[in-house]
Amino acid sequence: MLRRLILAAAAVLAFAAAPAFAETEAEHPENYPFSFEGVFGTYDRASVQRGFAVYSQVCAACHALEHMSYRNLGELPDGPFLAYRVTNEETGAQEITLTPHGHHGKPVDPNDNPYVRSIAEAATISAIDRETGQPTDRPGRPSDRFRSPFPNESAARLANGGALPPDLSVIVNARHGGADYIRSLLLGYGEPPAGVEVVEGKYYNRYFPGGWIAMAPPLVVEGQASYSDETVATIDQMATDVAHFLEWAADPKMAHRKSMGFSVMIFLLLLAGLTYTSYRLVWRNEKH
C-alpha cells in the first residue's frame, strides 16, 4: 500500500513539473552554412569585416572583447584588416591595401597598419599620465585591448537592469551550437507562445534556455549597421556577419591550424608508406 502511494505521488509530481520543463526547453539553433565549417573551411573575410562593423556599431555598447587587442584585426593569417604593401604597376609607388591573401604584396605590421590604427584611435582609452601620475584619456593604440563599455561589473549591471552582459571574446566556444546559436539567438526574438507567462523586464527568445532573456533585441531595423561594401544590411545579414566575426574572434588562427593539420596528415601517410615498404624489404627473405 505504501509503495502504491509513493508511486502515485511521484506520478503526480512528474505531471505537475512537465509544463515547467517544457517552458525551459529551447529550439535547436538553425544550421547555417558558414564558410568556415568543415575540414577545408576558411573565413569569409568580407563577412568578418562586416561583422566587426555590426559589433562596433551595435554590440560594443554593452559587450566587451576582453581577450582581443586592436592589433589582432591586422595580424596574420586571417585578420579581417590585414593590410599589404604593394607596388603600383603604373607609378611604381608603394601603397598599402587590403588586397585579399596578399596578392603580390608584403604583409604590413599591425602597429603600422593604417586601417588598424584608425580603428584603435577611434576608441578613448583611460590611462595614467606618466608625467603627472593623474588619470587621463588618450586615443587607442593597436597594442591596446578592446575598450570595455563599462568601467566595472557593478556599472555594467546597473546599466542593464541587474544583468551582466557576457564578454564576447570566446562566446561561440562557450555556447552549445557556436556561431549557429549566436545567429539564431539574434533572430529568435518574438511573441511568446499561447499559455506562456510573460516575465516582466525580459524578452522572449525561442532559442534561449528558459525562453526569457534580459537582452533586448539588438538588431531591430535594416541598415542599423553601416557596411562599407554594397551588401544590404538586413537583420538576417547582420546576424550572420556578426556571428562570423565572433567565430573569428574566438579562433583567429583556425585556417592556419587546418592547413597545418592537413600537411601533417599527408606527412604521416607518406611516413607510414615508407615504413611499410622498409619493413617488406628488410624481412622479405624471412618466413612469418
Image (spheres, rainbow, N blue to C red):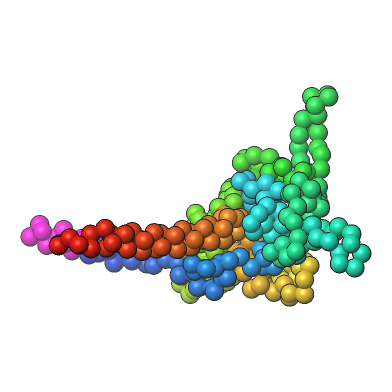
Up-down relation of residue 125 to residue 209 (above or below): above
From the image, which quarter does the C terminus lie in?
A: bottom left
Of residues 53 and 94, the one nearer the viewer is 94
Q: How many numbered marks are there?
A: 0
The residue positioned 52% from the left and 65% from the top of the image is 181
Up-down relation of residue 156 to residue 285 (above or below): above
Of residues 279 and 188, the one nearer the viewer is 279
Q: Can residue 86 be found in the magenta stretch? A: no
- Check the image and name the residue furthest to the top: 132
Of residues 257 and 137, the one nearer the viewer is 257
Left or right: residue 175 compared with residue 243: left
Q: Looking at the rendering, which quadrant does residue 243 occupy?
A: bottom right
Percent position (x, y) of residue 155? 66, 42
Left or right: residue 225 compared with residue 195: right
Please say whether residue 148 is visible from this viewpoint.
Answer: no
Left or right: residue 179 compared with residue 74: left
- Check the image and name the residue furthest to the right: 91
Please say whether residue 40 is visible from this viewpoint.
Answer: yes
The residue positioned 74% from the left and 49% from the top of the image is 109
The residue positioned 86% from the left and 57% from the top of the image is 94
Of residues 78 and 49, the one nearer the viewer is 78
> Is most of the magenta stretch helix, strand or loop?
helix
- Check the image and name the residue furthest to the left: 1
Percent position (x, y) of residue 272? 35, 61
The residue positioned 85% from the left and 59% from the top of the image is 95
Q: Looking at the rendering, which quadrant does residue 254 occupy?
A: bottom right
Percent position (x, y) of residue 73? 69, 54
Up-down relation of residue 132 to residue 126 (above or below): above
From the image, which quarter does the N terminus lie in?
A: bottom left
Percent position (x, y) of residue 217? 63, 64
Query: Which span is picked out in magenta?
Result: 1-10
